[in-house]
Image: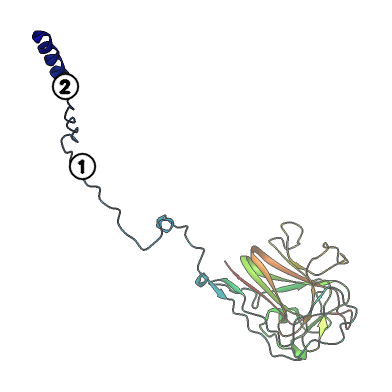
Amino acid sequence: MKKMFGLIFLALLLAAVSCKKQPPAEPVGPGPEVHQQPTTPAPQTDKPAAAQTEQTPPAAASGDLVAIPLVLPKPQFVGTPENLFGIENIDKKPDGWVQPPFMAPKGVVNVALNKPVTSSEPEPIMGELKMITDGDKEATDGSVVELGPFSQWVQVDLGESHEVYAVAIWHFHKQARVYFDVIVQISDDPEFVTGVTTLFNSDIDNSSGLGVGQDKNYVDDRNGLVVDAKGTKGRYVRCYSAGNNSSDLNHYIEVEVFGKK
């Protein structure tokens, strides 16, 4: 019996030892330390990221353009005239309006000064054709060239082809008048058959036979008419008109052509 109890006691002792809690396993370490090369930070800048890309070059500076040497004659009347009743498609400028500076490339001059002038009417009723480019644009009786009725034209020969940026015309500004069917063309053909560019056309019904124009009638005053020629090349400039609101006659005081070779 003692021997049996001893065996039982030994079995219980072994069971107690096997059930004893085992110590926790050692945690796995991070392994050997790895030294990484530090990254160089990007340089700081005050500009946003988008601004650091290459920019599109700016357009030509305004300094590349200058005002053409346009000198206006003395005023002869003030305000909008009242005798314009019934005139269609008219551009009424406010009282005191003055032609603003017309900008063009540097080097542009009046290439029409003292250049020869021809006309649909070789013998004017009054004045001489050469007066149209003599530089005198004042509204005096001795400065006006008068042509006959209906559609007439004057043509300036610039002597050679030029890049033309503006054409300025004064018909008659001693009194308030509107000249009809004003058309300005440029070409290298003296007969104006080929290579013709129309710069201005106020003929709203094609009565002059050169096409229907989109430009407005205007009161001829000291400002005259300044036409944007946009650098069109040509040797000859031709100007048409077809009477005015006071008479069927046509008049020219001065034509200036601003261009460069």
Figure check: 246 above or below 30: below
Q: Nearer the viewer, residue 102 or 158?
A: 102
Figure check: 22 above or below 103: above
Q: Quadrant of residue 17?
A: top left
- The CA distance from mark 1 to mark 2 is 52 Å
Q: Quadrant of residue 236?
A: bottom right
Q: Amino acid at mark 2?
A: Ala
Q: Nearer the viewer, residue 190 or 8?
A: 8
Viewport quadrant of the C terminus = bottom right
Q: Are marks 1 and 2 in contact (CB under 8 Å)?
A: no
Q: Amino acid at mark 1?
A: Gln
Other-residue count near label 1 (Cα within 10 Å), few / some / many at <14 / 14–19 / ≥20: few
Residue beneath disc 2:
16
Residue beneath disc 1:
36
Which structural element holds mark 1?
loop
On the image, the x and y values in percent for residue 90 come to 82, 76
Q: Residue at position x 42%, y 59% from top?
A: 51
Q: Quadrant of residue 176?
A: bottom right
Rendered image: mark on residue 230? none
On the image, the x and y values in percent for residue 14 come to 14, 17
On the image, the x and y values in percent for residue 167 come to 68, 73
Left/right of residue 37 with respect to residue 80 in the rendered view: left
On the image, the x and y values in percent for residue 161 come to 62, 64
